[in-house]
Image: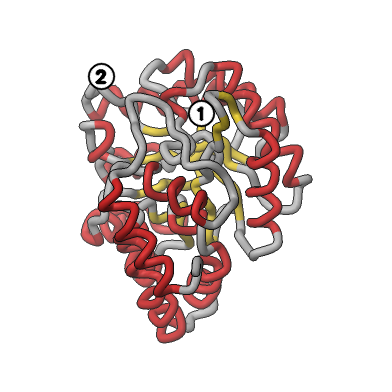
Amino acid sequence: MFQGSIVALVTPFADGKIDEQALGGLVEFHLTSGTHGLSPCGTTGESATLTPEEHQRVISIVIEASGGRVPVIAGTGSNNTDEAISLTRYAKSAGASGALLITPYYNRPTQRGLYEHYRTIAQSVDLPLIVYNVPSRTGVNLLPETIAQLAAFDNIVAVKEATGSLQQASDILALCGDRITLLSGDDFTAFAAMAVGGRGTISVTANIVPKEMAQMANAVLCGDYAGAKKWHDKVYPLHAALFLETNPVPVKEALSKMGRCRSEVRLPLCAMSDAHSEKLASVMGAYGLIT
């Protein structure tokens, strides 16, 4: 159902408020660049510091601006199951194509708790759901065996696998087969994850080079692994530069250098250091993104 290069969309801010004009411009940038899908209000979209009203507003803006031209997979996860259900219901009512649900963070539930969390959401909202596993952020790893159990629910259609482990990705594919779609959530290993059977990526780097990430995904989906490897090699230095500091600080700095939105982030995130900003600019300049 969902495949290709799906951008983990930033949320632009201006003077502490959502920059709606810049957000609409970013959506149009992706629509004209071949991006296969939009995922607002995830980690890169600073969902943790959006108010519930802002969260809903960002989802609505992206859906309206995209006009049905590509799927919109709204980030609706929470460490509060009831809150996740509420956000997911809103996403459905707003016209989202699906929802992206991070594993509950801070609570550190057991595998049974994770299963019950996703089961409850799946049975409460009839919308295609992507479970999002990123242990480096949440402190808990959604194991392949648990994902295989969740694949029994018709509306749990994919997993965003962000461990960076090809072993875990391969285990998921071995246990689930075609019952669930594997999407990479780690730009460094996106090509490799697709090469072992993944169908796409939910990408930070796609914020600044959407055409290249889409071309890489298209090549893999067509079986052109040599071509995909060339795209991977080309964008790899950008992957490294965009994780010099905590995401989304570097990618917002990069978008600011490209004139697409301000670099503003919300506390407790803060502006990128001068040294890292200079290093990012050097990589972007070598790539040809800025002069």
Residue 16: where, in percent of width, then height?
53, 24
Q: Amino acid at mark 2?
A: Asn
> Looking at this rendering, what residue extends furthest in the right direction?
67
Decide which of 77, 150 is in the foreground and name it: 77
- Decide if residue 183 is in sight here: yes
Q: Which mark is residue 76?
A: 1
Give above or below for 129 relative to 283. Answer: above
Q: Residue at x 70, y 38 (%)?
A: 21
Question: Disc 2 vs disc 1: Cβ atoms closer than 8 Å?
Answer: no
Within the image, what quadrant is residue 125 found in?
top right
Q: Answer yes or no: is residue 181 visible.
A: no
Going by the numbered disc 1, the residue's amino acid type is: Thr
Reply above or below: 182 against 51.
Answer: below
Q: Position of residue 105 (x, y in %)?
A: 30, 26
**Quarter of the image holding residue 89?**
top right
* Residue 92 locus on image (x, y percent): 66, 29
Q: Nearer the viewer, residue 282 or 80?
A: 282
In the shown orientation, is residue 200 left or right of residue 193?
right
The kind of secondary structure element at disc 2 is loop
Badge 2 or badge 1: first in the primary sequence: 1
The residue singled out by tag 2 in the image is: 107
Identity of the residue drawn at 61% across and 60% down: 35
